[in-house]
Image (spheres, rainbow, N blue to C red):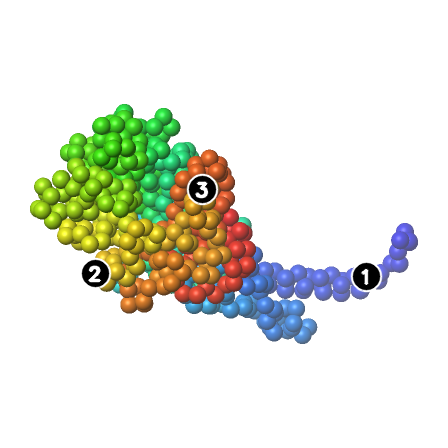
């Protein structure tokens, strides 16, 4: 550049300064206008859902020179949140949406929501302000309210004017609303303007973990609880007693506890974490089969046939001592697990798998005749055992379930009417279709081993389930195999549970299990929350679940 500058006449300098001053004043006016717009609580930096803010015909860049309208901004119509599971309905609106800000507040309408408020505040880096009645830009407000009889797990989330309001009839619904919000703003995203109305199709959305055959650390289980909470599951089943181990500390029978086990303090911590995610922990002490860990310490209780051959995992239910030790454990652990749900087991009692149980186990046949008359059978005795254990647990005000093969066919003694059916297989001797249980009015929980069983080592005919197969082919009405039960029974199917069984415990590490079940858990969550055909393709769903982590 030349260092010699031409001198500008004084009048022209004054004229140029006047133009600069005028332009500066216009800029200040525009800035004041933007400041007024921002004070409405909308984030000028926030992107609208679905893309960038559209440039309107009256935006400054499109206005002929010489005009000075007040500043304005136009937004594309919002798209539904992208979450797993997907929200059921979203009413679109125009606006910038909402992003969490460090200075933003989480406020609640009721002290009952304090834990949920503190949790989401910490997750989003916001300030938990407690119960407040004032309204500020950037707020996330959690509130109780709704029509009488509404599903307590349903919720409404409204994003409007730079604020978010999540309301529900009960705390679980509020929590699920915070999960939707957390996922939508994950990685710096924006919650879209508009109204979400959401709720689950099924009241039971479970994950069951076999910690008896394989020891899982408390921290690993806690990580799964957090994962389940974000996916809107509400049950964690713990199968902690089997032939290979008894994995929780026992004070009444410490002799049966495996070397690797969870302390009661660790279990209480897991339960507390689960409660903070509105998840009920469902314990299972299976009987009268699958009691090998108990028998190892009490070999006199093992069932033996006429030749003295022991039956693996089965206690002799003709012996009162067998009932006593199981009742001791049921009573003890009812005090540890406060949830209202309980799994009694009842499956695969090996005395009933032989051609003639009465001939092989005459002591059982004699006990049956003594208890139920001359026509009493070994199946009657096994059903009576299940009912007696139900009486023990019912005294603790629990709702109980038992595996479908524990509901024996052709017995004069009927299973207790309040037992729910945990239907997992159609492979047992004398297998019955799900409709045979449903037609009697029983409620059923779907554990379909064709889709929902992750069995370590893939023994027998099991293969590791895939998220794609669950997502594309399974619904809660597909209870056995690949065929759905008639729609008229839909209300009796309370939901479903994805289960990890550790038959060949060393086939996978904890980390491999976590990785292997991640997509099946996401897919099961989607189908339990909304059993209709998903709108996203499997590749789209998989990519979304992967992005959300």
Observer-nearest of 285 and 276:
285
Question: What residue do we see at 40% from left, 33% from top?
Answer: 215
Q: Secondary structure at mark 3?
A: loop
Of the two numbered discs 3 and 2 on the same chain, state the one appearing first in sequence: 2
Nearest-to-viewer mark from 1 and 3: 3
Task: Using residue 69 as the reference point, say whether residue 239 is left or right of it.
Answer: left
The answer to which image quadrant residue 333 occupies is: top left
Of the two numbered discs 1 and 3 on the same chain, state the one appearing first in sequence: 1
Q: Is residue 66 above or below residue 191?
A: below
How far is the residue under mark 2 from the one under mark 1? 102 Å
Observer-nearest of 16 and 545:
545
Question: What residue do we see at 31% from left, 43% from top?
Answer: 281
Disc 3 to disc 2: CB gap under 8 Å: no
Circle 3: is it few (<14), some (14-19), or many (20+) Cα within 10 Å? many
Residue at the disc numbered 1: 10
Q: Secondary structure at mark 2?
A: loop
Residue 440: which numbered mark, if any? Answer: 2
Q: Position of residue 72 (x, y in %)?
A: 55, 68
Q: Position of residue 486 (x, y in %)?
A: 32, 67
Nearest-to-viewer mark from 2 and 1: 2
Q: Is residue 360 above or below residue 21?
A: above
Residue at the disc numbered 3: 456
Observer-nearest of 212 and 165:
212
Circle 1: is it few (<14), some (14-19), or many (20+) Cα within 10 Å? few
Circle 2: is it few (<14), some (14-19), or many (20+) Cα within 10 Å? few
């Amino acid at each position: 550049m030349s260092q010699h500058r031409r001198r500008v006449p004084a009048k022209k300098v004054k004229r140029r300064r006047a133009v600069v001053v005028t332009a500066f004043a216009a800029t200040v006016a525009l800035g004041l206008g933007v400041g007024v717009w921002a004070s409405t609580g909308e984030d000028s930096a926030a992107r609208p859902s679905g893309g960038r803010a559209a440039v309107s015909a009256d935006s400054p860049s499109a206005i002929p020179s010489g005009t000075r309208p007040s500043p304005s901004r136009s937004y594309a119509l919002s798209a539904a949140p992208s979450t797993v599971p997907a929200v059921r309905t979203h009413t679109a609106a125009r606006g910038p949406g909402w992003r969490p800000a460090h200075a933003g507040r989480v406020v609640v309408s009721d002290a009952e929501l304090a834990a949920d408020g503190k949790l989401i505040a910490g997750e989003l880096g916001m300030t938990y302000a407690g119960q407040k009645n004032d309204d500020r830009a950037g707020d996330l407000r959690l509130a109780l309210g709704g029509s009488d009889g509404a599903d307590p797990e349903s919720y409404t989330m409204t994003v409007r004017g730079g604020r978010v309001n999540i309301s529900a009839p009960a705390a679980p619904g509020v929590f699920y609303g915070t999960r939707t919000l957390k996922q939508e703003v994950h990685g710096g995203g924006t919650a879209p303007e508009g109204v979400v109305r959401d709720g689950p199709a099924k009241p039971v959305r479970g994950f069951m973990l076999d910690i008896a055959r394989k020891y899982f650390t408390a921290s690993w289980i806690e990580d799964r609880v957090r994962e389940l909470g974000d996916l809107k599951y509400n049950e964690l089943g713990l199968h902690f007693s089997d032939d290979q181990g008894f994995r929780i500390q026992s004070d009444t029978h410490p002799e049966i506890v495996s070397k690797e086990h969870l302390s009661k303090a660790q279990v209480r911590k897991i339960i507390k974490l689960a409660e903070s995610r509105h998840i009920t922990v469902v314990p299972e002490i299976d009987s009268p089969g699958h009691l090998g860990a108990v028998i190892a310490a009490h070999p006199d209780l093992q069932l033996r046939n006429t030749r003295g051959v022991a039956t693996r995992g089965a206690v002799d239910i003709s012996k009162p001592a067998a009932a006593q030790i199981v009742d001791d454990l049921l009573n003890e652990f009812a005090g540890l697990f406060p949830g209202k749900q309980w799994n009694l087991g009842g499956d695969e009692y090996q005395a009933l798998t032989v051609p003639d149980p009465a001939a092989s186990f005459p002591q059982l046949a004699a006990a049956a005749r003594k208890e139920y008359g001359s026509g009493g059978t070994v199946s009657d005795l096994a059903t009576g055992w299940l009912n007696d254990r139900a009486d023990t647990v019912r005294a603790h005000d629990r709702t109980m379930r038992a595996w479908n093969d524990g509901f024996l066919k052709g017995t004069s003694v009927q299973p207790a009417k309040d037992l729910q059916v945990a239907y997992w297989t159609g492979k047992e001797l004398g297998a019955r279709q799900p409709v045979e249980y449903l037609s009697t009015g029983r409620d059923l929980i779907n554990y379909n081993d064709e889709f929902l069983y992750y069995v370590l080592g893939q023994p027998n005919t099991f293969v590791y389930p895939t998220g794609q197969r669950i997502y594309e082919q399974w619904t809660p009405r597909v209870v056995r195999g690949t065929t759905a039960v008639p729609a008229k029974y839909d209300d009796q199917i309370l939901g479903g549970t994805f289960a990890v069984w550790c038959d060949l415990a060393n086939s996978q590490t904890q980390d491999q299990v976590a990785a292997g079940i991640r997509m099946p858990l996401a897919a099961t969550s989607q189908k339990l929350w909304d059993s209709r055909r998903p709108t996203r393709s499997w590749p789209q769903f998989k990519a979304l679940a992967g992005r959300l982590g």
